Amino acid sequence: AQKVTQAQTEISVVEKEDVTLDCVYETRDTTYYLFWYKQPPSGELVFLIRRNSFDEQNEISGRYSWNFQKSTSSFNFTITASQVVDSAVYFCALSEAGRDDKIIFGKGTRLHILP
Amino acid sequence: GAVVSQHPSRVICKSGTSVKIECRSLDFQATTMFWYRQFPKQSLMLMATSNEGSKATYEQGVEKDKFLINHASLTLSTLTVTSAHPEDSSFYICSVQDRTNYGYTFGSGTRLTVV
Protein backbone atom coordinates (compact mmCIF):
# COMPACT_ATOMS: atom_id res chain seq x y z
CA ALA A 1 0.00 0.00 0.00
CA GLN A 2 1.13 3.51 -0.69
CA LYS A 3 2.16 5.75 2.17
CA VAL A 4 3.68 9.20 2.53
CA THR A 5 5.44 10.36 5.67
CA GLN A 6 6.23 13.96 6.49
CA ALA A 7 7.92 13.74 9.84
CA GLN A 8 8.13 17.48 10.39
CA THR A 9 4.79 18.68 11.69
CA GLU A 10 5.73 22.31 12.06
CA ILE A 11 8.83 24.35 11.21
CA SER A 12 9.65 27.97 11.99
CA VAL A 13 12.53 29.82 10.40
CA VAL A 14 13.53 33.43 10.13
CA GLU A 15 13.07 35.11 6.80
CA LYS A 16 15.93 34.62 4.31
CA GLU A 17 16.97 31.33 5.87
CA ASP A 18 16.91 28.17 3.81
CA VAL A 19 14.55 25.42 4.86
CA THR A 20 14.12 21.81 3.78
CA LEU A 21 10.88 19.89 4.08
CA ASP A 22 11.28 16.14 4.25
CA CYS A 23 9.14 13.55 2.52
CA VAL A 24 9.54 9.77 2.62
CA TYR A 25 7.27 7.49 0.67
CA GLU A 26 6.38 3.81 0.41
CA THR A 27 5.09 2.03 -2.64
CA ARG A 28 5.28 -1.41 -4.22
CA ASP A 29 4.89 -0.02 -7.71
CA THR A 30 7.80 0.71 -10.00
CA THR A 31 5.83 3.42 -11.76
CA TYR A 32 4.55 6.19 -9.58
CA TYR A 33 4.29 9.95 -9.31
CA LEU A 34 5.33 12.24 -6.52
CA PHE A 35 3.89 15.67 -5.89
CA TRP A 36 4.31 18.70 -3.68
CA TYR A 37 1.44 21.06 -2.99
CA LYS A 38 1.24 24.29 -1.04
CA GLN A 39 -1.86 25.16 0.95
CA PRO A 40 -2.05 28.78 2.10
CA PRO A 41 -4.59 29.86 4.74
CA SER A 42 -7.24 30.29 2.04
CA GLY A 43 -7.29 26.51 1.74
CA GLU A 44 -6.76 26.23 -1.98
CA LEU A 45 -4.13 23.71 -3.04
CA VAL A 46 -1.34 25.15 -5.15
CA PHE A 47 0.50 22.67 -7.34
CA LEU A 48 4.29 22.94 -7.08
CA ILE A 49 5.78 19.94 -8.81
CA ARG A 50 5.11 16.46 -10.19
CA ARG A 51 7.89 13.93 -10.68
CA ASN A 52 7.63 10.45 -12.10
CA SER A 53 9.56 7.53 -10.69
CA PHE A 54 11.85 7.23 -13.69
CA ASP A 55 13.14 10.75 -13.48
CA GLU A 56 15.56 11.14 -10.60
CA GLN A 57 17.00 14.42 -11.73
CA ASN A 58 16.81 17.14 -9.17
CA GLU A 59 14.81 20.17 -10.14
CA ILE A 60 15.16 23.84 -9.41
CA SER A 61 12.49 26.46 -9.95
CA GLY A 62 13.48 29.86 -8.69
CA ARG A 63 13.92 29.61 -4.92
CA TYR A 64 12.43 26.12 -4.87
CA SER A 65 14.36 22.91 -5.40
CA TRP A 66 13.56 19.25 -5.06
CA ASN A 67 15.81 16.31 -4.31
CA PHE A 68 14.43 12.94 -5.42
CA GLN A 69 16.35 9.89 -4.22
CA LYS A 70 14.85 6.49 -4.95
CA SER A 71 17.52 4.75 -2.90
CA THR A 72 16.10 6.32 0.25
CA SER A 73 12.53 6.74 -1.04
CA SER A 74 12.70 10.44 -0.37
CA PHE A 75 11.51 13.51 -2.21
CA ASN A 76 12.64 16.51 -0.21
CA PHE A 77 11.76 20.11 -0.90
CA THR A 78 14.03 23.05 -0.19
CA ILE A 79 13.12 26.72 -0.13
CA THR A 80 16.11 29.00 -0.47
CA ALA A 81 16.09 32.51 0.98
CA SER A 82 12.66 32.01 2.48
CA GLN A 83 10.08 34.77 2.46
CA VAL A 84 7.07 35.46 4.65
CA VAL A 85 4.80 34.61 1.72
CA ASP A 86 6.15 31.09 1.84
CA SER A 87 4.30 30.53 5.10
CA ALA A 88 1.78 27.77 4.45
CA VAL A 89 1.17 24.07 4.87
CA TYR A 90 3.10 21.94 2.41
CA PHE A 91 1.93 18.50 1.40
CA CYS A 92 3.89 15.75 -0.24
CA ALA A 93 1.78 13.23 -2.15
CA LEU A 94 2.08 9.97 -4.07
CA SER A 95 0.11 8.37 -6.85
CA GLU A 96 0.63 4.84 -8.12
CA ALA A 97 0.21 4.85 -11.88
CA GLY A 98 -1.83 2.12 -13.44
CA ARG A 99 -3.80 1.34 -10.32
CA ASP A 100 -6.64 3.51 -9.20
CA ASP A 101 -4.62 6.65 -9.79
CA LYS A 102 -5.65 8.21 -6.52
CA ILE A 103 -3.31 10.62 -4.77
CA ILE A 104 -2.44 9.93 -1.16
CA PHE A 105 -1.19 12.84 0.89
CA GLY A 106 1.27 13.06 3.74
CA LYS A 107 0.15 14.78 6.92
CA GLY A 108 1.72 18.03 5.84
CA THR A 109 4.33 20.36 7.27
CA ARG A 110 3.22 23.74 8.56
CA LEU A 111 5.91 26.26 7.70
CA HIS A 112 6.18 29.58 9.50
CA ILE A 113 8.49 32.19 8.06
CA LEU A 114 9.17 34.82 10.69
CA PRO A 115 9.95 38.40 9.63
CA GLY B 1 -3.91 22.03 -16.70
CA ALA B 2 -7.64 21.61 -16.21
CA VAL B 3 -9.76 24.36 -14.70
CA VAL B 4 -11.94 23.15 -11.85
CA SER B 5 -14.79 25.05 -10.26
CA GLN B 6 -16.16 23.97 -6.91
CA HIS B 7 -19.35 25.41 -5.47
CA PRO B 8 -20.30 26.60 -2.92
CA SER B 9 -17.13 27.82 -1.26
CA ARG B 10 -18.84 28.05 2.12
CA VAL B 11 -22.06 26.62 3.43
CA ILE B 12 -23.73 26.57 6.82
CA CYS B 13 -26.58 24.16 7.35
CA LYS B 14 -28.70 22.90 10.16
CA SER B 15 -28.15 19.48 11.63
CA GLY B 16 -30.26 16.87 9.84
CA THR B 17 -30.39 18.61 6.50
CA SER B 18 -28.56 17.62 3.31
CA VAL B 19 -25.98 19.65 1.46
CA LYS B 20 -24.85 19.28 -2.15
CA ILE B 21 -21.40 20.30 -3.31
CA GLU B 22 -20.62 20.61 -6.99
CA CYS B 23 -17.34 20.07 -8.76
CA ARG B 24 -17.13 21.15 -12.39
CA SER B 25 -14.38 20.62 -14.87
CA LEU B 26 -14.67 23.71 -17.04
CA ASP B 27 -12.35 22.91 -19.91
CA PHE B 28 -11.67 19.24 -19.67
CA GLN B 29 -13.69 16.03 -19.86
CA ALA B 30 -13.04 14.26 -16.62
CA THR B 31 -13.80 10.55 -16.46
CA THR B 32 -12.41 10.45 -12.95
CA MET B 33 -12.78 12.88 -10.09
CA PHE B 34 -11.77 12.51 -6.49
CA TRP B 35 -13.34 13.81 -3.29
CA TYR B 36 -11.28 14.65 -0.23
CA ARG B 37 -12.10 15.79 3.28
CA GLN B 38 -9.80 17.85 5.44
CA PHE B 39 -10.38 18.49 9.14
CA PRO B 40 -8.67 21.51 10.72
CA LYS B 41 -4.91 21.21 10.82
CA GLN B 42 -5.03 17.76 9.31
CA SER B 43 -4.19 16.25 5.97
CA LEU B 44 -6.46 15.60 3.02
CA MET B 45 -8.13 12.26 3.34
CA LEU B 46 -9.49 10.63 0.21
CA MET B 47 -13.18 9.84 0.57
CA ALA B 48 -14.05 8.39 -2.80
CA THR B 49 -13.21 8.14 -6.46
CA SER B 50 -15.98 9.37 -8.72
CA ASN B 51 -16.26 7.61 -12.07
CA GLU B 52 -18.38 9.03 -14.87
CA GLY B 53 -21.33 6.82 -15.64
CA SER B 54 -20.70 4.32 -12.88
CA LYS B 55 -20.81 3.99 -9.13
CA ALA B 56 -18.25 5.77 -7.04
CA THR B 57 -15.54 3.82 -5.24
CA TYR B 58 -15.46 4.67 -1.56
CA GLU B 59 -12.48 4.44 0.75
CA GLN B 60 -12.66 2.21 3.75
CA GLY B 61 -14.60 3.80 6.58
CA VAL B 62 -16.52 6.26 4.41
CA GLU B 63 -20.26 5.74 4.54
CA LYS B 64 -21.58 5.61 0.99
CA ASP B 65 -25.15 6.21 2.11
CA LYS B 66 -24.14 9.35 3.92
CA PHE B 67 -21.86 10.80 1.27
CA LEU B 68 -23.66 10.37 -2.02
CA ILE B 69 -21.58 10.91 -5.12
CA ASN B 70 -23.00 11.39 -8.56
CA HIS B 71 -20.86 11.74 -11.67
CA ALA B 72 -23.51 11.94 -14.35
CA SER B 73 -21.46 13.81 -16.95
CA LEU B 74 -17.85 14.28 -17.94
CA THR B 75 -17.83 17.76 -16.48
CA LEU B 76 -19.76 17.46 -13.24
CA SER B 77 -19.49 15.44 -10.07
CA THR B 78 -21.57 16.15 -6.99
CA LEU B 79 -21.11 15.18 -3.36
CA THR B 80 -24.21 15.23 -1.19
CA VAL B 81 -23.78 15.08 2.55
CA THR B 82 -27.04 13.59 3.77
CA SER B 83 -28.51 14.18 7.21
CA ALA B 84 -25.52 16.28 8.12
CA HIS B 85 -24.30 16.43 11.71
CA PRO B 86 -21.81 18.76 13.40
CA GLU B 87 -19.06 16.12 13.07
CA ASP B 88 -19.43 16.38 9.29
CA SER B 89 -18.20 19.96 9.48
CA SER B 90 -15.05 19.99 7.42
CA PHE B 91 -13.30 21.28 4.31
CA TYR B 92 -14.27 19.25 1.24
CA ILE B 93 -12.09 19.39 -1.88
CA CYS B 94 -12.56 17.79 -5.27
CA SER B 95 -9.88 16.90 -7.77
CA VAL B 96 -9.87 16.21 -11.49
CA GLN B 97 -7.35 13.94 -13.08
CA ASP B 98 -5.92 14.60 -16.52
CA ARG B 99 -4.75 11.21 -17.72
CA THR B 100 -2.89 12.69 -20.69
CA ASN B 101 -0.24 14.24 -18.51
CA TYR B 102 -0.93 12.67 -15.14
CA GLY B 103 -1.84 16.02 -13.72
CA TYR B 104 -4.32 16.64 -10.95
CA THR B 105 -6.21 19.88 -10.55
CA PHE B 106 -7.99 20.67 -7.31
CA GLY B 107 -11.08 22.73 -6.70
CA SER B 108 -10.93 25.64 -4.31
CA GLY B 109 -12.76 23.68 -1.64
CA THR B 110 -16.02 23.93 0.27
CA ARG B 111 -16.06 24.77 3.95
CA LEU B 112 -19.07 23.04 5.46
CA THR B 113 -20.33 24.02 8.90
CA VAL B 114 -23.19 22.08 10.42
CA VAL B 115 -24.92 23.80 13.33
Image (cartoon, rainbow, N blue to C red):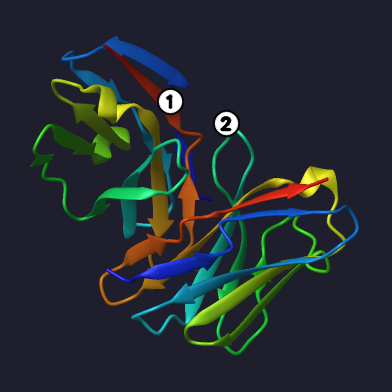
Mark 1 residue type:
Arg
Q: Determine which quarter of the picture holds residue B100.
A: bottom left
Instruction: Mark yes or no: residue B85 visible.
Output: yes
Q: Which chain letter goes with mark 1?
A: A
Q: In this view, does B113 lie above or below B17?
A: above
The residue sitting at 38% across, 63% down in the picture is B105
Residue type (three-letter) at the residue carrying disc 2: Lys
Q: Name the residue under label 2.
A: B41
Camera-nearest residue between A15 and A78 = A15
The image position of residue B83, as x and y in percent, is 87, 61
Q: x, y percentage for residue A67? A: 19, 35
Residue B37 vertical position relative to residue B65 in the rendered view, above or below: above
Badge 1 density bin: few <14, some 14–19, many ≥20, Cα 10 Å: many
Residue B6 has which mark?
none
Residue A107, relative to residue A19: is it above or below? below
Q: Mark 1 points at which residue?
A: A110
Q: Where is residue A105 in the image (x, y as percent from the top left)?
A: 48, 45
Q: How crowded is mark 2: few (under 14 residues within 10 Å), some or many (20 or more)?
A: few
